[in-house]
Image (cartoon, rainbow, N blue to C red):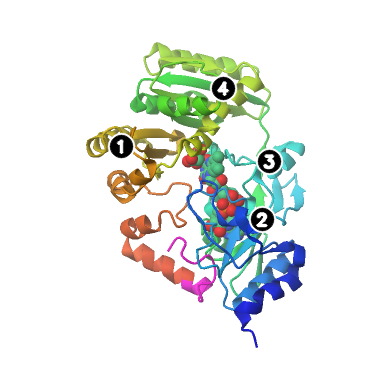
Amino acid sequence: MPNAAATVVSRLRAIVGDANVLTAPADVEAYVNDWRGRYHGTTRAVVRPATTQQVSEVMTACADASVALVPQGGNTGMCGAATPDASGEEVVLSLARMRAIRGLDAANATITAEAGVTLAAVQEAAAQAGLLFPLSLGSEGSCTIGGNLSTNAGGTAVLRYGNARDLVLGIEVVLADGRIWNGLRALRKDNTGYDLKQLFIGSEGTLGIVTAAVLKLFAAPRTRVTALAAVVDVSHAVALLRAMKQALGDRLVGFELVSGVALQLSRKHHPDLPDPLPGHPWYALLQIDDSASDAKLAALVEGALAEAVGGGVAVDATIAQSHEQAQRLWALRDNISEAQRREGPNIKHDISVPISAIPAFVDDTAAAIADAFAGAQLVVFGHLGDGNLHYNVAAPPGVEAQSFLSRTRQVNRLVHDRVVAAGGSISAEHGIGQLKREELAHYKAPLELELMRRVKAALDPRGLLNPGKVL
Ligand code: FAD
Ligand code: MLT
Ligand code: ZN
């Protein structure tokens, strides 16, 4: 008599159909490796349910057989959180077939989307209704709403609209025992006890499986200005941010910092992209939106930037003259990650500190890295408006990348000790996954870790949901 774990795959086939249970190595390959090529696992099967009911039945079947599940959306995450382990026993639960938009309520300014809908598809549905879903990531064509919520994604419009967590009114979740919690409320006010949805948001698939969500929509921008400014150092970038906030108020949607090194790396891999202000050490990319048709917005931005240049805050600045020019400026910024992937392995950090502490953090950390690892290459960029930098460290020229990676813990200490000393976070927007589990255990207060473990034990007492991630 075969045991339950051995027969679980046939039970999964009965739930979702043969075509949606993948086991052949070639079929599962895309699901068991992360996009950066840093994490590789194996799986008993990839199961692809199409409905919440099927997810519930899949979860129940796995719970009955004591088989662990790894939820997966677009598999664009940065921390190996959607990659199964090497045992070959875990099941990958892909939500990619759950891609219905269940409804859009223009008067309530909400959209209800299933977990597997890509972020771009939600943005598009909102735009068709004359509204805006503001979450914006370089991966938006592939990442999914389930993944965005489960990682509490950030991106380039947090300054104005907040993180994914701020954009959710309700969720539907399949619990570890297979029961379905329908929390799809579309309310902006609901003080009926604990805000349970927020427990699942940012939990990286370790507490429940998100199957759908009610998301907030906003007035669509009718006027958009995109500008690039060059500055001499990061403290001037912070001063520019402050000046632009003062001049533009909440029309300032995004304020991205890009080092000259990062910009040139992006251009190295996309030589067709422009270099409108060549030769500067740091740049800020700004997006300014207004929901009114306002022909004067460009002049306002131009005036504010001219004042910044005149006052020595910025060295130079340029404003995109067309939608295409704006897209090309954003492509320079959005392609940095992909350029880094092509360049080879590097040690990534996704940190946040109070914005006022960023200049000293950048200077001190660069000096410490230069002392300890002469010639190490820093690729620094990110969401300065949110105090969030991607502080990436690559091997010195001539040092083999893999041997540099063996120093990861030492590099992490140099960077993360300074982050924590500045009152910051070792993971601003990418989460913990497997990449930062050790760092979390090192830096998080024991009481916070204990509370997290208690929440995990309450919602997933048998440890079947994404084991080995986060905690
Ligand atoms: P996956 O990678 O598939 O999964 C991520 C985590 O969520 C895993 O723990 C997984 O188990 C869990 N999960 C997925 N779906 C569900 C579900 N339905 N229920 C429960 N758990 C689930 N991130 C940012 O925050 N800001 C950025 O600016 C940004 N830019 C990026 C740019 C590029 C080019 C790339 C490749 C990635 C970028 N990312 C960014 C990272 C990534 O896109 C986000 O973390 C995204 O939210 C992941 O979504 P996904 O659907 O790909 O999730
Ligand atoms: C970004 O802001 O581009 C992302 O978070 C990706 C990265 O850090 O590489
Ligand atoms: Zn980012």
Q: Amino acid at mark 3?
A: Gln
Disc 4: which residue: 273
Cβ–Cβ under 8 Å for marks 2 and 1:
no
The quadrant holding residue 67 is bottom right
Q: Main secondary structure of the magenta part?
A: loop
Q: Amino acid at mark 4?
A: Leu
Q: Is 31 placed above or below 63 here?
A: above
> Which residue is most to the top?
310
Q: Position of residue 192 (x, y in %)?
A: 58, 64
Q: Secondary structure at mark 4?
A: loop
The quadrant holding residue 172 is bottom right
Q: Nearer the viewer, residue 186 or 257?
A: 257
Q: Amino acid at mark 2?
A: Ala
Label 4 Cα neighbours within 10 Å, binned few <14 / some 14-19 / many ≥20? some
Whichever of callouts 4 and 1 sits on the residue coming sooner in the sequence is: 4
Q: Nearer the viewer, residue 417 or 9?
A: 9
Q: Position of residue 96 (x, y in %)?
A: 68, 55
Disc 1: which residue: 361
Q: Position of residue 44 (x, y in %)?
A: 60, 68
Q: Nearer the viewer, mark 4 or mark 2?
A: 4
Instruction: Inspect the magenta stretch and tell me whether residue 229 lies in it.
Output: no
- Looking at the rendering, the stretch of residues picked out in magenta corresponds to 457-471
Cβ–Cβ under 8 Å for marks 4 and 2:
no
Q: Nearer the viewer, mark 4 or mark 1?
A: 4
Whichever of callouts 4 and 3 sits on the residue coming sooner in the sequence is: 3
Q: Amino acid at mark 1?
A: Phe
Asked if ligand 1 lies within 8 A of label 2, the reply is yes
